């Protein structure tokens, strides 16, 4: 009888310990869940404070680089051009829009060993554009304050009582002094994790125009600041290649308060 009682007592104690451990484990789980929730909340806040402008659908418009193109498998990038396109060009320090005036010349790309076609404008063209509502004539523009916007720098533009701020974020990996073709020295940085943010005085939330994980011996440049679509707000054109064997342009069109982003790029790696 005593043996049976002792065995029952031992089983009871073991059961009680198991229940205690299970209860303790259940009580410890909620702090882990809370930590995950806090982490997600912080991430969500970070992501929404500077959301990214989406690229516009090609049906809303296009831009075109005025340059030479390689013809791969008989696909001709220049085939999209016609008399409906506009040319944004510079003349004597002023910018104009006019219907395109160009020639296309056949050639051969020795590096890629494929045929090529070169689009040659009869003007000093910045790029070709195709949007509804464009009108020919003089385009208002403002002087570019600073072409390259390095990480931790900001540039502000004022136009018709509107202020636009461009703020750069990113990491500077290395710095060197380079000499250009005119013998002028300038500081150049190798940049990674780059973001260019945009905000305006019309109350819009700050947003990211573009981001680049790594620039390879190149960097972004501001090429044009003005009112292409004549809505009283600034439009921007940036050169934004990722590497030294690429040409790339990005257009931010203010579009009457509904900004649109368009880009075009072409590789010429060998």
Image (cartoon, helix red, strand yellow):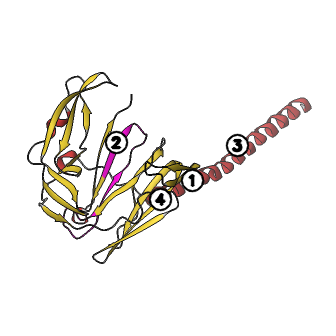
Provide residue 226's location: percent of width, then percent of height.
27, 64
Q: Residue at x 40, y 36 (%)?
A: 245
Which of labels 1 and 4 is toward the front?
A: 4
Left-right relation of 90 to 20:
left
Which quarter of the rendered picture does the N terminus lie within?
top right
The one of 266 and 12 positioned closer to us in this rendering: 266
Q: Specify the label residue 247 is tagged with.
A: 2
- Along the horizontal axis of the image, is 175 left or right of 268? right
Label 2, label 1: how many angstroms apart (C-alpha)? Answer: 39 Å
Q: Residue at x 52, y 51 (%)?
A: 188
Sort mark 4 into few (<14), some (14-19) or many (20+) by Cα contacts within 10 Å.
many
Mark 4 or mark 1, which is nearer the start of the sequence?
1
Q: Secondary structure at mark 4?
A: strand
The answer for how far apart the CA atoms under marks 3 and 1 are is: 27 Å
Q: Is residue 158 above or below residue 16?
A: below
Mark found first going from the N terminus, 2 or 4: 4
Between the residue at mark 2 and the residue at mark 4, the CA separation in whole angstroms equals: 21 Å
Q: Residue 64: where, in percent of width, then height?
A: 23, 45
Contact between labelled residues 1 and 2, with CB atoms less than 8 Å apart? no
Give the camera-side residue of 151 and 7.
151
Q: Quadrant of the C terminus?
A: top left
Outermost residue toward the right in this view: 2
Mark number displayed over residue 168: 4
Among the 4 quarters of the image, the one containing residue 3: top right
**Residue hosting label 1:** 39
Which range of residues does the magenta coloring cover? 226-250
Which numbered mark, 3 or 4, is in the foreground of this view?
Answer: 4
């Amino acid at each position: 009888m005593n043996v049976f009682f002792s065995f029952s007592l031992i089983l009871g104690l073991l059961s009680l310990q198991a229940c205690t451990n299970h209860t303790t484990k259940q009580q410890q789980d909620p702090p882990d869940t809370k930590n995950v929730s806090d982490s997600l909340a912080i991430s969500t806040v970070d992501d929404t404070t500077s959301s990214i402008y989406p690229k516009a659908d090609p049906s809303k418009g296009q831009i075109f680089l005025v340059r030479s193109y390689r013809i791969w498998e008989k696909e001709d990038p220049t085939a999209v051009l016609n008399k409906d396109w506009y040319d944004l060009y510079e003349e004597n320090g002023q910018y104009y829009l006019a219907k395109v005036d160009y020639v296309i010349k056949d050639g051969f790309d020795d590096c890629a060993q494929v045929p090529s076609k070169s689009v040659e404008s009869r003007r000093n063209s910045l790029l070709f554009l195709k949007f509804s509502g464009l009108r020919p004539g003089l385009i208002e523009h403002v002087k570019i304050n600073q072409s390259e916007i390095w990480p931790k720098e900001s540039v502000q533009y004022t136009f018709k009582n509107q202020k636009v701020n461009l703020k750069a974020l990113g990491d500077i990996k290395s710095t060197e002094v380079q000499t250009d073709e005119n013998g002028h020295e300038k500081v150049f940085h190798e940049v990674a994790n780059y973001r260019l943010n945009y905000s305006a005085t019309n109350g819009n939330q700050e947003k990211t125009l573009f981001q680049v994980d790594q620039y390879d011996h190149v960097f972004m440049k501001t090429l044009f600041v003005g009112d292409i679509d004549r809505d009283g707000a600034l439009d921007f054109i940036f050169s934004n290649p990722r590497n030294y064997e690429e040409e790339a342009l990005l257009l931010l069109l203010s579009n009457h308060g509904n900004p649109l982003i368009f880009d075009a790029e072409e590789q010429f790696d060998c």
